[in-house]
Image (cartoon, rainbow, N blue to C red):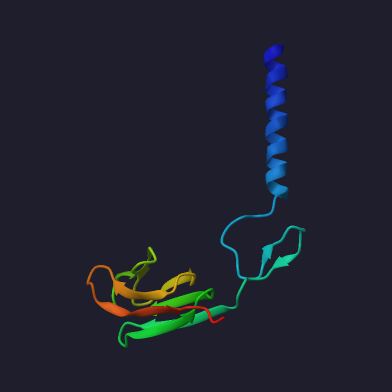
């Protein structure tokens, strides 16, 4: 009798847990400007506009951004390797049909090499300029 009550209690708890999980807002990789704020349905805007830049391994170049900007850096190439933002502890795979994509908050001024991990070849440089003001 006690075992039956315990099983019913556990089944009710599992049902409530499943219901709560189904009603909760999904978590995971969000899109800029679509995160939910303190009030349900209130969009949260990014602190600064998203800056998008592209680098190609065939033509290394320097990418300039201002301190505090949100950067989406896309690195295209024809190699199978990994791209590293040296000094920012960011690493992404790259393949001929799949570019490496980095989402970076440029919060520390400096110059950061963009380098292929296996070959050691430099693909460019990310330069974060101090904020004006």
**What residue appears at the point 53 percent right and 73 percent down from the top-left corner?**
68
4 and 45: which is toward the camera: 45
**What residue appears at the point 67 percent right and 67 percent down from the top-left corner?**
34
**What residue appears at the point 50 percent right and 76 percent down from the top-left corner?**
67
Image mark count: 0
Instruction: Give how far across and how far down residue 42 sits, in percent.
Output: 75, 64
Q: In the image as oriented, which residue stretches furthest toward the front?
A: 133
Instruction: Give how far across and how far down residue 115 sits, in percent.
Output: 30, 73
In the figure, residue 10 lies in which quadrant? top right
Up/down of 31 relative to 17, above or below? below
Quarter of the picture containing the C terminus is bottom right
Instruction: Give how far across and how far down residue 79 sits, in percent.
Output: 28, 76
| Left or right relative to 52: residue 125 | left
12 and 67: which is toward the camera: 67
Q: In the image as oriented, which residue stretches furthest toward the left?
A: 119
- Can the viewer see residue 76 in this picture? no
49 and 43: which is toward the camera: 49
| Left or right relative to 71: residue 20 | right
Instruction: Give how far across and how far down residue 61 sits, in percent.
Output: 35, 86
């Amino acid at each position: 009798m006690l075992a039956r009550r315990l099983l019913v209690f556990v089944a009710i708890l599992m049902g409530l847990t499943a219901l709560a999980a189904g009603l909760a807002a999904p978590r995971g990789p969000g899109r800029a400007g679509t995160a939910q704020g303190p009030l349900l349905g209130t969009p949260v805007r990014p602190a600064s506009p998203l800056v998008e830049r592209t680098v190609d391994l065939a033509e290394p170049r320097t990418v300039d951004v201002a301190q505090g900007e949100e950067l989406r850096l896309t690195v295209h190439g024809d190699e199978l390797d990994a791209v590293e933002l040296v000094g920012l502890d960011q690493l992404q795979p790259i393949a001929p049909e799949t570019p490496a994509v980095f989402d970076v908050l440029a919060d520390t001024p400096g110059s950061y090499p963009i380098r292929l991990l296996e070959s050691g070849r430099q693909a460019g440089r990310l330069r974060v300029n101090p904020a004006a003001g």
